[in-house]
Image (cartoon, rainbow, N blue to C red):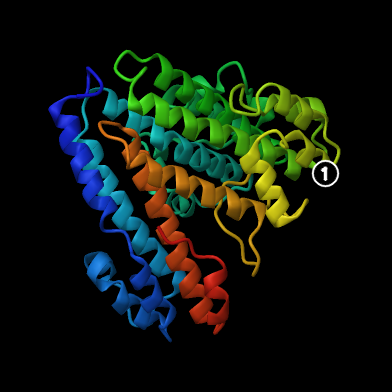
Amino acid sequence: MEGLFYNASNGYIEGIVRGYRNTLLTGQNYTNLTQCETIDDVKLQLGPAYGDFLAALPPNPSTSALADKTLDKLVSEFRYVQANATGSLAKFMEYLTYGYMIDNVALLITGTLHERDTRELLERCHPLGWFETMPVLCVATNVEELYNSVLIETPLAPYFKGSISHQDLDELNIEIIRNTLYKNYLEDFHQWVNSNPEVANTPTSEVMTEVLEFEADRRSINITLNSFGTELSKQDRKKLYPNFGRLYPEGTLMLSRADDAEGVRIAVDGISDFRTFFDQTGTGAQQSSGIGNMSGGSGDDSKTLEDMFYQKEMEISKLAFTRQFTHAVVYAWVKLREQEIRNITWISECIAQNQKERIGNYISVF
């Protein structure tokens, strides 16, 4: 068996996750969904895969309510796997939740600045980024109290220390803070998969190194493109790039000096995948909001650079399932399920807006 530390318990978990992967919607399922006329029709078609989770929905539910219920399925399955994970797999799954935690903390910081209702903020947080002490953060009455709570009460404390001070927590800096945390998180995760004695030099480290390098490069490109026309200086922009990846260090150095989208295209030209993405979408086709936004998909009829990134992510995720004895299948399954949720949401929105002709331009079938 590959991987000296890959125990029977984790092998059992891998079997469960592979079973979850087999329940993803098929091409025929999507064909049936595109023929739906109402959201109730969509709900009916999703019955075999999501029935228990959709049962409480009212007739003709909103697309957001439908999306929430499909997310509930992912969260339920993830929590089951996490509860049964042991050793390095348990730590691996903790790492998978840190990205969602970062988004949640950023949301709470923004809400605190605007004196938003605590309950409303907690309801909007991603459930996979929930941690036991998160409600404590909402007790803070100002950003300094919130900052001190984050350092003490959350798993993200190491990513704040030495990088962000409470003076940085204001509306202008919130996206910079988010990306600083992501940079620290990705570098830490990358180091862990390549140094942990249970994971290093195993299929998990091989697959996850590719995954994390791709994510580091994607964020560096997005940060650069979204910085144009903002007050973010080239020097500050460079600080947000993860210090690893296929673009690092020459490509990220060129990105830090880029003045426009053409400069970004030149910087990534040495990586065939990225060169193809720019060629297929056209230079400057990026459609996103905020520095390094990680939300998926676009509302346009043509694919954007971000759509191409998600397509590549799906390819990597599918390939992860061709490997045996690897924690990476958990990551891959989560990403494939998230894409399925985006597909369902997009189809539902097109149907609700009576624009079914736009469906095929976006959904990714795997």
Q: Amino acid at mark 1?
A: Glu
The image quadrant where one finds the C terminus is bottom left
**Which residue is situated farthest in the left direction here?**
8
Residue 352, image x and y in percent? 50, 80
Quadrant location of residue 83?
Answer: top left
| Left or right of 48 in this view: 124 | right
Q: Which residue is mark 1?
A: 262
Residue 100 vs residue 184: left or right? left
Number of numbered callouts drawn: 1
The residue positioned 60% from the left and 28% from the top of the image is: 246
Which residue is at 48% across, 37% downward?
A: 99
Q: Answer above or below: position of 214 versus 304.
A: above
Question: Residue 312: x, y in percent?
Answer: 53, 47
Q: Residues within 10 Å of mark 1 (few under 14, many from 20)?
A: some
Q: Is residue 290 visible?
A: no
Quarter placement of the N terminus: top left
Q: Residue 341 at what x, y percent from top left? A: 41, 60
Front in this rendered view, residue 240 or 158: 240
Q: Is residue 156 visible?
A: yes
Q: Is residue 230 above or below residue 95?
A: below
Residue at 34 percent across and 27 percent down: it is 203
Q: Secondary structure at mark 1?
A: helix
The answer to whether residue 162 is above or below residue 260 is above
Name the residue located 63 percent from the left edge and 61 percent from the top edge: 303
